[in-house]
Image: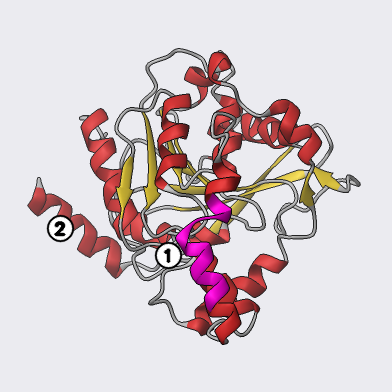
Amino acid sequence: MLFYLLILTLLNLVFSFEIKSKTITNSDNLNIVVKYSIPKFLEYYSYPLLFIHGSNSGSWVFEEKWFEYFNYLGWKTYGINLRGSYETGNTNNQTLKLTDLVDDLSLVLSNFKSLEVDDDIILNRKPIVIAHSFGGVVLSKLFEKESVSDLISAGIWLSPYPHTNDYNYIARFLFSKKIFDFVVYFITGKIKNKYELDKYLLYDDKIDIELVKNYSIRAEEDSKLVIDFTDLALNMPLKENIVNNTIPRLIIGSCDDVLIDNISISNTAKLLDAKNPVMVKGPGHNMMLGTYYTLVPNKIINFLDKHFGDIFN
């Protein structure tokens, strides 16, 4: 098997990497843009991966490195652009409602077969959904629906935004050592501008500042609208509403994430009844873009290999 995987990876490396897009129109007549990329060689893993971005971002955060990395390993990758992102845009609303984002995700999942990317490729398995940061709240809200087991094969949360059972998050965040260090760095001039602040809050300490600047400029295009926090407070996922099913679920956090600490990761795992959350060391909050971008995919693959022994067609 290891020899086979090595040959597959080498063959995928030979062929060019390409990202395409398709759209699904929602009830507000908004075209939800889904980006995708498939391995160029013949063999695919039978479960497609669907990525959900967080706030102030789009599918590009996964396209930058992870699409290509998973493709080389034989995985089909898809990335939804939720309303409010640069790719999809928005209706005339001034804010983003959680309920609308969940509806858009449900729509894409319900019509996932329409995203078939080749006439001879049949998506005969429900996607594995991987959600980052606020995208994790959108995914958790989906787990309140009885139909979730008809839509996805597994759920994976990456540094998820704190959920309703994390009552002390704000206090922990404000009085954490990392925030104290930030204040010291700001006063002493170690953090001089927006991009150095973004690096400290979102990325690992080894990433090049020019990359951070590029990512920050791109994120500005996805930051035109803000979350409707009244709607969010009224509709946050609740433990008692999470559907009891056997869908495999995994929570991954980073010990070096300035924004989301290990207690928050543990609390989210409890709310979702996700056993054994995984903590890695090295990546920042945007773990798909930094120096350690291969670390988390390897944890994901280990999890999927454990739960899906038949991952080849």
Let me know if residue 186 appears in the view.
yes
Would you identify the image quadrant in which residue 255 lies? bottom left
Give coordinates of residue 141: x percent, y percent.
Answer: 60, 27
Q: Amino acid at mark 2?
A: Leu
Give the residue displayed 57% in from the left and 50% down from the top.
53
User: Where does the magenta region start and end?
Assistant: 173-184
- Of callouts 1 and 2, the N-terminal one: 2
Residue 190 falls within the magenta-colored stretch: no
State left or right for residue 106 relative to residue 309: right
Q: Main secondary structure of the magenta part?
A: helix
Amino acid marked by disc 1: Lys
Q: Residue at x 66, y 74 (%)?
A: 217
Q: 309 and 183: which one is in front?
A: 183
The residue to which callout 1 is attached is: 65
Q: Position of residue 198 (x, y in %)?
A: 58, 71
The residue at 55%/29% (across/down) is 165
Residue positioned 58% across, 55% down in the render: 174
The residue pinned by badge 2 equals 6
